[in-house]
Image (cartoon, rainbow, N blue to C red):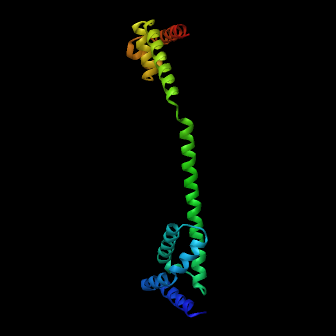
Amino acid sequence: MDVYEDDNHIYWERLRKGDKQALFALYNNTYSHLLRFGLKMGSNDELVKDCITQLFLQLWTKQATLPPVTNVQGYLFTALKRQLLDQLAYQAKIHAAIHRMTDKEAENELSYEEMIIRSQQDEEIKHRLQQALKALTPRQIELVRLKFFEGMTYEQIAAQTSQTVKTAYNTIYDAIKTLRKVLK
């Protein structure tokens, strides 16, 4: 072992015993080497710097369970490589999800002309429905509203309107038949 690695080994052992100063010393002693290593992996410098910081934070939080290591620099390079690969995979997943979302939005976007056509179609449907409703009696309109807009059962409608269940059913059935005929 060279002097550099001897120092790292001493810092590592002190770190394992909870010495915060050893963590800082190890960081200062290995930072430039780790940065160069990360950049050689093809990552951008911000990502590499973030991963180095994360690596040393993890070392501190796991210091009590860190194993004894003979080649500290090799251990740190391997840990940094894992950290970078995890981050790159995570970023790729995020990028893919964003790409899928923007593709779906592009598919769902309507042209101005399509929006006008749909708006006109909606207006036409509303107008036809209003005309069809005029063909119903006030009692039929009331029962249709209770059944389809308020979600009541035939029993609830009968109880609320003081009719039999059969009368409520027949009134709604006749109203639907009339609406179908007018809307054809």
Q: Position of residue 92 (x, y in %)?
A: 58, 57
Q: Quadrant of residue 143?
A: top left
Question: Looking at the rendering, in which quadrant would you find the N terminus?
Answer: bottom right
Please tell me which residue lies in front, 106 or 112: 112
Q: Is residue 23 above or below residue 149?
A: below
Numbered-mark total: 0
Looking at the image, residue 137 sits to the left or right of residue 89; the answer is: left
Q: Position of residue 81 (x, y in %)?
A: 60, 72
Q: Quadrant of residue 24?
A: bottom left
Q: Position of residue 20 (x, y in %)?
A: 43, 83
Q: Is residue 148 above or below residue 1?
A: above
Q: Position of residue 181 (x, y in %)?
A: 54, 7
Residue for point 54% across, 45% down: 101
Please tell me which residue lies in front, 154 or 91: 91
Residue for point 59% across, 80% down: 75
Question: Looking at the rendering, in which quadrant would you find the C terminus?
Answer: top right
Please tell me which residue lies in front, 174 or 109: 109
Q: Is residue 28 above or below residue 106?
A: below
Looking at the image, residue 133 sits to the left or right of residue 89; the answer is: left
Looking at the image, residue 76 sits to the left or right of residue 136; the answer is: right
Residue for point 47% across, 13% down: 129
Q: Is residue 102 above or below residue 158?
A: below
Please tell me which residue lies in front, 53 or 140: 53
